Each structure stands twice: as structure tokens, then as C-alpha cells.
Image: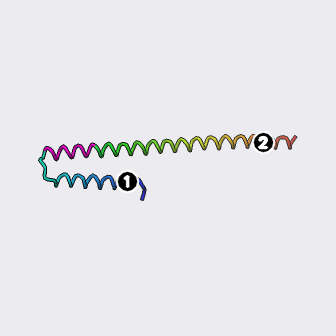
Amino acid sequence: MSTSKILLGIIAGVAVGAAAGILTAPDSGVNTRKKISEKSQGYANDLQNKVNNFKNGFKSSVNTVKDDVHMIADQAKTKLGDHAKKAGSYNS
């Protein structure tokens, strides 16, 4: 099971638990709705931050891989050119 699925499950569980706790608490409807709204907004903000952190980390990883691939390709071209020069000098 992936980490993102586990994290999403935990977040959903916490949200359901918090909502159940708020709904069963003895409070007026106005206060209950206000609490639900505040909690929901907080969870939404937390989730958005986690998504943004994941996206930024993923983009960083992709850029690192791209840089590595370019570096390896450049090294391969250089070695290929060196071998071609050597092969040309043997044929002369």
C-alpha cells in the first residue's frame, strides 16, 4: 500500500472522527455548524499544503533525474567521440 493512500486514509479518518465528535457534542446548531466549517477549512488547508509539498518534491525529483540523464548523455557522447577518434587513428 502506498504512503499517499495511507496518509489519505488517516486524514479521512481524522475528519470523520472530528465531525462525529462535533455532531454529538451538546452545542447549539449555529456553534456546531461554525465548528464544522472551521475544522473543514483547517483540514482543507492541511491537505492542500501536503499536496503542494508532494508536487514540489516530485518536481524536484524529476528535475534531478533530468539533470542526471543529460550528464550521462554528455559523458556518453564524449566517450563515443574519443573511441571514434581512436578507431580513426588505427585505420590511418
Residue depicted at 47% across the width and 44% down the height = 57
Q: Amino acid at mark 1?
A: Leu
Instruction: Name the residue rendered at 55%, 43% in the picture.
Output: 64
Mark 1 residue element: helix
Residue closest to the far right:
92
Judged by depth in the image, the label closer to the viewer, 1 or 2, is 1
The residue tagged 1 is 7
Q: Residues within 10 Å of mark 1 (few under 14, many from 20)?
A: few
Report the front residue among 70 and 52: 52
User: Residue 78 at x, y = what percent?
Assistant: 72, 40
Residue closer to the observer: 67 or 26 = 26
Q: Start and end of the magenta stretch?
A: 30-41
Magenta stretch: helix, strand or loop mostly: helix
Residue 85 inside the magenta-drawn segment: no
In the rendered image, residue 43, in percent from the top left (x then y), is placed at 30, 46
Quadrant where the image shows the C terminus = top right
- Residue at the limit of the structure toward the left, as seen here: 28
Tag 2: Cα neighbours inside 10 Å, few (<14), some, or many (≥20)? Answer: few
Q: Identify residue type, mark 2.
A: Ala
| Residue under numbered circle 2 | 84
Classify residue 57 as left or right of residue 82.
Answer: left
Dot 2: element: helix
Q: Count the marks: how many?
A: 2
> In screen coordinates, is 40 left or right of 86?
left
Report the Cα–Cα distance between label 1 and label 2: 53 Å
Q: Residue at x 77, y 41 (%)?
A: 82
Q: Residue furthest bottom?
A: 1
